[in-house]
């Protein structure tokens, strides 16, 4: 009897405490991804809308329209980049370079970027096929994080085939001039090869001061050309030999209208304009008279 009574539950005993089961994380994770996805597309929409002179969209449904505007702009730049080849006919760029600013790329989930890449690739292939254009290689998307890009942009290019296409165009131009010279004189004269148009270099003087010692260095920029690297390593375009300067400290480029743009490339001691630090992954313009600091090295830039 005593054994049976011991096995019976006590009616006056307190109910067992419930285990504290954590809430499922999946709904919150999905909400976070959706929020980042929406923010990314809103950022795209704002950039595109500014470029076409419209107010940025604000709602999620309308931000999808911004994606359509991005695709429309990509198609327009594909058309602008079409080259004529004597053998192939109209040749379109095949490499769609998806350039995303660092902050947008860091916040966007990978699946959202993958979906965007898929939509852009499908739109590019359809546009090229619908317009009966040729390409030198299969159409593809290449996503790059670009510190000099604001928001997001698509840049159609010929990639590694650019030099080949330029060479074919130059040879065709020489052949055409040779035929024209022969027909106009009734005989033959050696064709004169036209020199391709060259972008005018812009010389910028950089006066830098390190530990009280000031020196000058001249830098050559091409408007909308390649960036110049700044850092302590000797293989940089602009070398600043000081322990406070990182090996590859920052990058400078000149945009199409001749404005210098500066970006920090992940330095240890920071890059500053007039004492204000530039966040990693962001780009800032350099105005006349600005004092730029790379670590403890101060530099003033002046166009000549």
Image: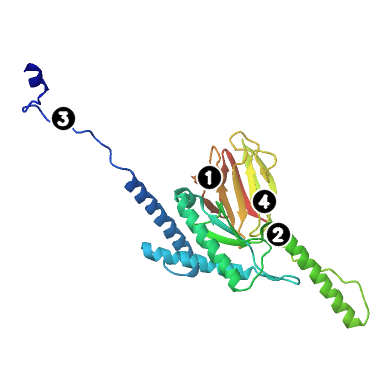
Q: Where is residue 115 shown, x and y percent of the image?
A: 48, 57
Labels 4, 2: front one: 2
Residue indicated by mark 4: 205
Rounded to the nearest whole Å, what is the CA distance between mark 4 and mark 3?
A: 79 Å
Q: Residues within 10 Å of mark 4 (few under 14, many from 20)?
A: some
Whether pointer 1 and pointer 3 mark residues with C-beta atoms closer than 8 Å, the reply is no
Q: Residue 50's spot in the image, x, y percent?
A: 47, 65
User: How far apart in space, not on screen, are marks 4 and 2 (Cα)?
Assistant: 35 Å
163 relative to 9 in the view: left or right: right
Q: Under tag 4, what secondary structure?
A: strand
Q: Sequence-wise, which precedes: disc 1 or disc 3?
A: 3
Q: Crowding near pointer 2: few (<14 within 10 Å), some, many (20+)?
A: some
- Is 83 placed above or below 148 here? below
- Residue appearing at x 89%, y 79% in the figure: 182
Instruction: Read off the residue under disc 3.
Output: 16
Q: Position of residue 235 (x, y in %)?
A: 70, 41
CA distance separating discs 2 and 1: 39 Å
Instruction: Tell me the residue that label 1 is attached to.
Output: 272
Circle 2 SS class: helix
Residue 161 image label: 2
**Residue 285 left/right relative to 174:** left
- CA distance separating discs 1 and 3: 62 Å
């Amino acid at each position: 009897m005593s054994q049976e009574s011991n096995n019976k539950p006590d009616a006056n005993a307190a109910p067992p405490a419930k285990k504290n089961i954590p809430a499922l994380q999946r709904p919150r994770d999905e909400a976070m991804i959706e929020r980042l996805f929406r923010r990314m597309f809103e950022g795209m929409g704002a950039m595109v809308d500014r470029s076409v002179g419209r107010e940025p969209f604000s709602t999620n449904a309308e931000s999808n329209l911004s994606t359509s505007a991005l695709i429309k702009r990509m198609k327009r730049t594909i058309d602008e980049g079409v080259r004529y080849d004597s053998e192939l006919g109209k040749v379109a760029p095949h490499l769609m370079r998806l350039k995303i600013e660092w902050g947008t790329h860091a916040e966007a989930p990978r699946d959202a970027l993958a979906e965007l890449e898929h939509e852009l690739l499908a739109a590019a292939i359809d546009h090229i096929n619908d317009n009966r254009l040729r390409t030198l290689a299969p159409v593809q998307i290449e996503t790059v994080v670009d510190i000099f890009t604001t928001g997001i942009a698509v840049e159609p290019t010929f990639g590694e085939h650019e030099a080949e296409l330029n060479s074919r165009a130059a040879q065709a131009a020489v052949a055409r001039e040779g035929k024209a010279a022969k027909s106009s004189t009734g005989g033959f004269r050696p064709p004169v090869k036209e020199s391709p148009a060259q972008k005018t270099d812009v010389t910028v003087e950089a006066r830098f001061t390190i530990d009280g010692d000031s020196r000058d260095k001249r830098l050559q920029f091409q408007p909308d050309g390649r960036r110049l690297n700044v850092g302590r390593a000797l293989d940089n375009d602009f070398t600043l030999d000081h322990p406070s300067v990182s090996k590859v400290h920052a990058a400078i480029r000149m945009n199409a209208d001749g404005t210098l743009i500066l970006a920090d490339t992940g330095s240890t001691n920071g890059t500053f304009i007039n004492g204000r630090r530039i966040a990693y992954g962001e780009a800032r313009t350099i105005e006349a008279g600005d004092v730029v600091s790379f670590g403890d090295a101060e530099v003033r830039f002046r166009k000549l």
